[in-house]
Amino acid sequence: MTLPLRIKAPLIFFPALLLSWECAVWLAGAAKIMPYPSGVALAAIRDIADGTLIDAIAGSLRRVITGFAVAALLGVPLGLLMGLVEPVRRALDPIVDSLRAIAPIAWIPLALLWLGIRGNAALFIVAYAAFFPFVLNTIQAVRLIDRKLVDAARALGASPLLVLRAVVVPGAVPTVMTGARIAMAFAWGSIIAAEMAIGIKVNPGGAATVGLGQLMVSTLYVKRDINGLVLYMLSIGLVSLAIDHGVRAFQRKATPWQR
Amino acid sequence: MATLTTPKIEARSVSKIYVSARTGDKVEALRGVSFSMKPGEFVSIVGPSGCGKSTLLSLIAGFATPSAGEVLFDGKPIDGPDPARGVMFQDYALFPWRTVRGNVEFGPMARGVDKTRRAAIVARNIEMVGLAGFEDRYPHELSGGMRQRCALARLLANEPDMWLMDEPLAAVDLQTRVILQDELLRLWGDAGDPAQRRAVLFVTHGIDEAVYLSDRVIVLGRRPGQVKEIVDIDLPRPRIGARTAPRAAALIDHIWNLIRAEAAQAIVEEP
Ligand SMILES: Nc1ncnc2c1ncn2[C@@H]1O[C@H](COP(=O)(O)OP(=O)(O)O)[C@@H](O)[C@H]1O
Ligand SMILES: [Mg+2]
């Protein structure tokens, strides 16, 4: 075989690692408190077969996507306004900065109080987390717009509205897209925390309408299934990679003029 | 009303002082610049770097306003950009998210020309600058010379009364530049009826280029930018194919002697 070392090395190393991990757990007799590869694999088969895993991922993703969309719908126009109108930026900068300094999950108690536990609270947390990357990157995007392109458009007869539509908006797209990637990462990161915090109250028995966060809480306190927990952690990572991949692919499609 | 005797451009004691928003520092870019341009005249501006050539062009384009004095276009004070004064920028300022077609189409679209007429205008101008077949390329997929042609097509598609060009040939290699100079003259109407020509204000740091192309050359001195001399280029037209007239060499020498000392100074002063 002439596989390059870059591929060959992990191909040997990774199974070896899994095998020694498996052996170590059994030899130490720690299978009750330590996860092990075969257990995780069995949990995966079980949860995929009965739909638990897919349902939970879908539940979380639905909230993430909704919250992300709300954040984009509110954050991008606000960023445009702040980027284009200096006094607005000066007035709102301190507010945005101080709100941004509050960790999204710190809002959970108030969100629960105002929005209840049926999922809207988690949605709020997600939207909150995703909102700031949109605002900040849109402000930055507007500032980075090449002044010459605005002049070029004006000299060609463009109205202020056309300058906004045909120069400012497309010129801002790449930087806003970068913001969207950060926003997505933040959204996905905070949904788990939000669902965990909310899940304890709503779903002690592990009933329906849960996301990955609720599933993890019930797995920890009700089922005490350590391998299941690791499976969910891996799922969180995989979904996160898939999301970033998707956003990047969309970014390339949306900005075909970029190298 | 503009009449035959109304200058296309008239600059009256124009000064421009930039004030830095951050530090409050002032830069006097132009001081007391006066000149006028006839319709159909090809005028170049030369001078050492930093002498205010781009500043002067931007005042005429309407991107900025003079700190003192005024600039008239067809006898009326310039009040913001106007598609009648087409601009070509030093680095072309093509819209990176628009293809060649999209860039050339922008002006007619902005002025509300309907789709079918627009398509015809675009096709004609892309053909004219030799970019047929490259309509769907993005600017980053073009060579420097092709970008330059695209910028030229974008300018021409708007049929402006006047062309304002800021070092349009600076970024291409020497052979390409020579070819593009001839194409520019051809498009302007070097061999044609003088009444059909557009007024061109052409910024360059190439003195030979200015002499080859222009009817008159405005020589600016630096810090602050002032008119040193306006040199009549009394070479016959058409000039395409006649680059090495002895008279041209004498004019080039003359202009070079006007700015030599300051150009040398500019090298050591550039930040
Ligand atoms: N927007 C600006 N703000 C402050 N200073 C400027 C600005 N534009 C140009 N300048 C200064 O004005 C002078 C003339 O610049 P410019 O017109 O670009 O010269 P040129 O095109 O002849 O090289 C330079 O000293 C430059 O630094
Ligand atoms: Mg310049």
Image (cartoon, rainbow, N blue to C red):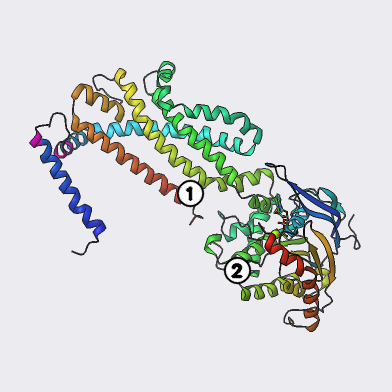
Toward the viewer: A158 or B127? A158
Residue B237 lies, with reference to residue A11, above or below; the image says below
Q: Chain of mark 2?
A: B
In the image as oriented, which residue stretches furthest toward the top? A113
Q: Say left or right for B57 vs A217.
A: right
Q: Label 2, label 1: how many angstroms apart (C-alpha)?
A: 27 Å
* Residue B162, x across and y down, in percent: 77, 61
Mark nearer the viewer, 2 or 1: 2
Type of amino acid at the residue the image marks with label 1 = Ala
Residue A51 in view here: no
Residue B47 lies, with reference to residue A174, above or below; the image says below
Query: Within the image, what quadrant is residue B160 found in?
Result: bottom right
Q: According to the image, label 1 marks what residue? A: A254
| Disc 1: residue Cβ within 8 A of ligand 1's nearest atom | no
Toward the viewer: B48 or B143? B48
Q: According to the image, label 2 marks what residue? A: B145
Secondary structure category for the residue under label 2 = helix
Q: Which residues are magenta?
A: A26-40
Q: Say left or right for A86 vs A172.
A: right
Establish whether labels 2 and 1 are both on one chain: no
* Residue A167, x across and y down, in percent: 61, 48
| Disc 2: residue Cβ within 8 A of ligand 2's nearest atom | no
